Image (cartoon, coloured by chain):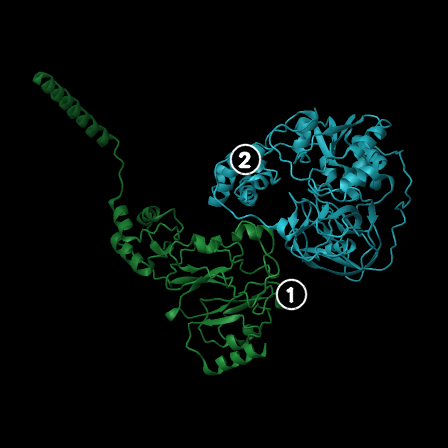
Amino acid sequence: MLKTFKIGGVHPPENKISAGKKIETLPIPKTVFIPVAQHIGSPASAVVNKGDVVKVGQVIAKSSGFVSTNIHSSVSGKVKKVDVSADSSGYPKQGIFIDVEGDEWLEEIDRSETLKTTFDLNGTEIIQKIQEAGIVGLGGATFPTHVKLVPPKGMKAEVLLINGVECEPYLTSDHRLMLEKADEILVGTQLLMMAMNVEKAVIGIENNKPDAIQLLTDKAKKYKGISVVALKVKYPQGGEKQLIKAVTGKEVPSGGLPIAVGAVVSNVGTAFAVYEAIQKNKPLFERVVTVTGKGIANPSNFKVRIGTATSELIEATGGLPENTGKIISGGPMMGRAIASLDVPVAKGTSGILIMQNTEAKRGEYMDCIRCSRCVSVCPMGLEPYLLMTFGQKKIFDRAENDRIMDCIECGSCSYTCPSNRPLLDYIRFGKGKVGQIIRTRKK
Amino acid sequence: MSLTVIYTIATLSIIGTSSAVILYFVAQKFKVFEDPRIDEVEQALPAANCGGCGFAGCRAFAEACVKADDLSDLNCPVGGNETMANVAKLLGLEATQKAPRTAYIRCNGTCDHRPKTSNFDGATTCAIAASVYSGETDCQWGCDGFGDCYNVCEFGAIELRPNLGVPLILDDMCVACGKCVDACPKNLIEMRKQFPKNRKIVVACRNKDKGAITRKACDVGCIGCSKCEKECKFDAITIENNLAFIDSDKCKLCRKCVPVCPTNSILELNFPPRKIVTEEKEECSTAK
């Protein structure tokens, strides 16, 4: 019996059509737009001006607080302007435009492919280096990694969970990374273990990636304290709380952080970025992005420089098909539709999904038939139909009592609703308002 | 048999009378004094319970009126000066005359002026659309047109106009309760001073982008050129963040700012047509 989380969950069609495609390196674009807010927390503040010459890996925006990260240039060239442009949030945000000239990297970055397994840093040095390299959670939530590694006072991490679940349909970037950079991920995991001073790490992988499970299990034997667990295929297993429940059997209390049960979760992509940052001195300025969809000619996994426009990625897979209904940044369940092809790849962009007209269309919105399917699939044990009504009627105090803030916005409720009700839309709206109310109350 | 009936009636009468006596004394003991004027004032109010006065409803407003020594801070926007005069008479206070106001949606970005560049297919409310992205057009400041204002209006004063994309506020029906002002996530609705015959001169735009970006997104967006500011002799127009604003309390309806606007974002509404201006406008529209 494979492990999984207890309550709720759905199993949408997997559609991992790009799983067999090797990671290709996308040619460097002519211009990039690098937003200064690519993480949760306060946006970084730009430290370059128009006309400055930058190299690959140079800091172009400095972190502006503890919950914030540095932003590094992904290309070499001249800063065109510091201005606003649309990013995946849907609103114009500040960022740095750079005109590319050549490909000149900072000298301290080790560009060789050789695996380096030895390291001589202690925990605090590793955390400091992670902070400087601008590493954030690459699973999509983009929470600064260095913040996670420092537990709040009185709490102690016992186990590190590495998230190789990739439960979103279509996406294959983590899967490919595990197959091609297994050793690097394992060394990165060791580094994270050392930074947090834990003895045990578990890599959770869903059972639809048997090759990755096999490879990592074999290789993990060489690394002390790391084990691999195969998990039953179920969405949203990649959610932090669901993964902890599935692997350790412990439940994170409502409103609590994973550290409350002694666990810290990091994505495989993050582990790889940590390896590169510490062993190769390479800050986070490129990532693996899956570009996929049923209609496109050549679904692929690309290694992309941060700031590359979405249009370049789509061009590289054979262009935008005519029957395109929606372009989604991220996976089909939790991703956001983007309104412009100029939206750049950011640290949190795990995939670009091109949906056909027929797939993208939402069904006609009908009345609730009280079937309670949304309740049975909610992985957090909430009552989505009720929270939606509270959002609609703006009854925020009751929404708060019914734990609206525990919602992880996985979209299982909207996916499963036979009446096509936009449950998550209203819940997310209510969650935003309740969050505001809580923040003002604290002040 | 008949004795049973008599006993029953007698017992019930005794219980009834004694309860009545107890209740009478309890009622005397726990009596809550309520100013009878609250009822009178409530009678004088429109009973719309809209909350436009800032209180929970007409009753709460009446209580506040009775408690207050001075009515200058209290105003029922629905009833207007007439109602407030009645209330003042009941309470023996003086009512201050307030200029009536009406709501206005400061966006003229209808479909023909502001083309759609994407389609939003989520839950059709402005609040959700605005929380997800900048909107169906390239203007992030303009009206979403899903009608959150229309849904909160209890007076039927807003016409949705789905084929134009921007709702219209009917001046005659609007009572200035201010619900739509709070409902609009883009802060487009403003309470403006009501002039005779509902005449108004407004900058029908809230776009704070630079001129070039505004022009790309919308034909009739304010580009912040400040021509109108220079033209105005009453200091009613201010420019801030590439956007002009006409203060309705200072505006004298001279209409001089309207023809100088290069993007036609200043509108004159409910005025008799000006001969020369209408000709010019026609030329403009054919030139396009």
Label 1 lies in what chain?
B
Q: Nearer the viewer, residue A239 or A281?
A: A239
**Image vertical order of residue B187 relative to residue A2, above or below:** below
Residue A373 - label: 2
User: What whole-number distance in Å separates the C-alpha atoms at marks 1 and 2?
Assistant: 46 Å
Q: Is residue A36 left or right of residue A91?
A: right
Dot 2 falls on which chain? A
Q: Which chain is green?
A: B
Which residue is label 1 attached to? Answer: B213
On-image quarter of the C terminus of chain A: top right
The amino acid type, in three-letter code, at marker 2 is Arg
Point out residue B117 in the picture as x, y percentages from the top left corner. 62, 61
Figure chain in cyan: A
Left or right, residue B50 beside residue A102: left
Answer yes or no: is residue A155 visible. Answer: no
User: How many marks on residues?
Assistant: 2
- B157 or A331: which is nearer to us? A331
Residue B272 against residue A128 in the figure, above or below: below
Which amino acid, mark 1? Answer: Ile
Residue at 76% over, 47% down: A289
Q: Nearer the viewer, mark 1 or mark 2?
A: 2
Q: Is residue A32 visible?
A: yes
Residue A22 image-quadrant placement: top right
